[in-house]
Image (cartoon, rainbow, N blue to C red):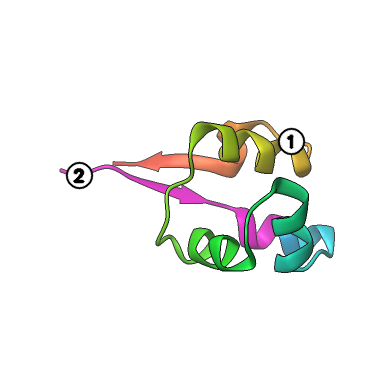
Amino acid sequence: MEATVINTIESSRRKAGVTQETLAQAVGVTRQTIIALEKGNYIPSVLLALKIARYFKEPVEKVFKVKL
């Protein structure tokens, strides 16, 4: 069984009322990276995951989860 990473970026972003572009600029990536993350097509580096979690003021474990 292969593990995958799921995330709550889109729902967290919508709840915070921010655009993909705003989030991307805040964490130092492109809007396309945020789109790929939200679609589950990209697994972020640890540093990027931490930056995103910090932006939303959430523990990284709440934003990113491993699905077995």
Q: Classify 10 Å Cα crowding around label 2: few (below 14), some (14-19), many (20 and above).
A: few
For residue 17, what is the image quadrant?
Answer: bottom right
Which mark sits nearer the N-terminus, 2 or 1? Answer: 2
Residue 15, label in figure:
none
**Which residue is painted at 47% across and 40% down in the image?**
65
Asked where in the image residue 59 lies, by quadrant, the reply is: top right
Q: Residue at x 52, y 42 (%)?
A: 64
Which residue does the image show at 49% across and 64% down from the upper left? 36
Q: Is mark 2 on a helix, strand or loop?
A: loop
Residue 66 falls in image quadrant: top left
Name the amino acid, label 1.
Arg
Q: Name the foreground residue: 28 vs 55.
A: 28
**Residue 39: horizontal and vertical position, in percent?**
47, 66
* Side of 54 where 17 appears, left or right: right
Residue position for label 2: 2
**Quadrant (top left, top right, bottom left, bottom right) of the C terminus:** top left
Mark 1: secondary structure: helix
According to the picture, the residue beneath numbered tag 1 turns out to be 54
Residue 66 colored in magenta in the image = no
Task: Describe residue 4's horizontal placement relative to residue 46 as left or right.
Answer: left
Asked if residue 4 lies left or right of residue 43, the reply is left
Magenta residues, start to end: 1-12
Residue beneath the point at 40% across and 62% down: 41
Q: Which amino acid does label 2 sit on?
A: Glu
Q: Horizontal and vertical percent for residue 34?
A: 59, 61
Q: Judge whether 46 appears above or below 24 on screen.
A: above
Q: Which numbered disc, 2 or 1, marks the residue closer to the eye?
A: 1
Indicate the quadrant containing the N terminus: top left, top right, bottom left or bottom right. Answer: top left
Q: How many labels does the image show?
A: 2
Q: In this view, does 18 lie above or below 49?
A: below
Q: Residues within 10 Å of mark 1 (few under 14, many from 20)?
A: some
